[in-house]
Image (cartoon, rainbow, N blue to C red):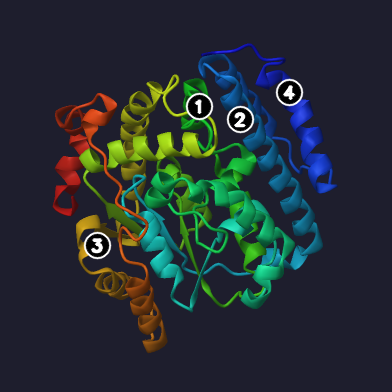
Amino acid sequence: MTTQHKKPLRQSIEQFHEMAIAQTGLSDFGQTDYLQRLEILLSSCDEQGQLNNALHAFAGGVVTAALSSRLIVENNLRQHPGSAKNAIERPIIIVSMSRSGSTALHRLLAADPNNQALELWLAGSPMPRPPREQWNSHPVFMASRDHFAGFNENPDYKAIHEMAPELADECVHLLFQDFAAVSLSCMINAPDFDRHLFNTDLSPCYERHRKIVQLIGTNEPHKRWVLKDPPSMPNLDQLMRVYPDACFVHIHRDPVKVIPSVCSLIQSGRVSAGAGATEHAEFIPQREMTWWPEALRRGLAARAQRPADFYDLSFTEFVRDPVASIRDIYQHFSLELTEASLNALTHHVETHPRDKHGRHSYTPGDWGITEGEIREQFSFYIEDYGQYL
């Protein structure tokens, strides 16, 4: 059931900014180039999203939260001007389609005590990372724990993608502060916004991303960064320019498994957010079957310019022996794997078995698509990278 709203989202931009100011007590949003992307996003949601009240409220909440995070970042960058000098040397950056094992790989790499990653609570409120023993009493950490409790109360979502403030998560949270990510358009039909991002140079957004990473790592500048963000696949050329010495790990999984899993994740996310699961959800498989082939083509073309900077990893091999996969990654990039690191990695694997929170079941048929249709859409990828699928 679609209901009437008091005001289109596009006409509420000023209100969203005012709410973010009220929530944070801050008022400087930094450079204003994000406004055009925000306007296009909300106009697309208004015109194409078939918003019910729940989706309308959800979108407004997500935008306000992103603006609040933006205010916090700008304030903390001013408070810590020296963070701009923090070196980010040879970061490990995981690229892939979504639902290809990137989260498990990311969190395993983050278990190496010589590495650091973007924890979920700091993604929402970027600041120099406090010592670990202070987290449980930190008001921002506690607020983040309460916020994500609702997602974990949904057993389906927790089985698909566990969210907790202390866990490493992806960079999409940082990019959405610039409205340069598909955090909302994958949940609400907004194809005009997706097309706009495809046709926009987002390099300034990735430069800001780097500044935020430098800020968070202020207290541990010696640790190697491990980052991941599957939705950055179409912007891989821009990511490569901003992180020119990065070690890219491309983890591959059969698209026949990936696409229905992505659709299931999005549906579960809508449920967890209280936005409804089935109403006007037919766009989900249509979008993923369109967006991902184009994103992948762009990403593959970009990485072809610097093949030596990439290591290809099979999802199947990673699941079979995660620690051996990490050993191979380190060896490929000539990174040191200490005994302490190896012990930490082994301990993580032993204490985080696959399907720890339940098994995620899905089939293409659940979404009205067939295996043959998926293979046809991704034939270019399957042909070139089939050995890893």
- The residue wearing badge 3 is 319
At label 2, which amino acid type do we have?
A: Ala
Reading the chain from its start, which is encountered first: label 2 or label 4?
4
Q: In this view, does 90 lie to the left or right of 349?
A: right
Give the SS element for disc 3: helix
Q: Is residue 387 above or below residue 375?
A: below
- The residue wearing badge 1 is 188
Quadrant in the picture for residue 370: top left
**Residue at 47% in and 39% down:** 269
- The residue wearing badge 4 is 12
Residue 247 visible in the picture: no
Reading the chain from its start, which is encountered first: label 1 or label 3?
1
Total marks placed: 4
Indicate the position of residue 155 as horizontal and vertical percent values: 42, 48
Pointer 2 local density, CA inside 10 Å: few below 14, some 14–19, many at least 20: many
Mark-to-mark CA distance, 2 and 3: 35 Å
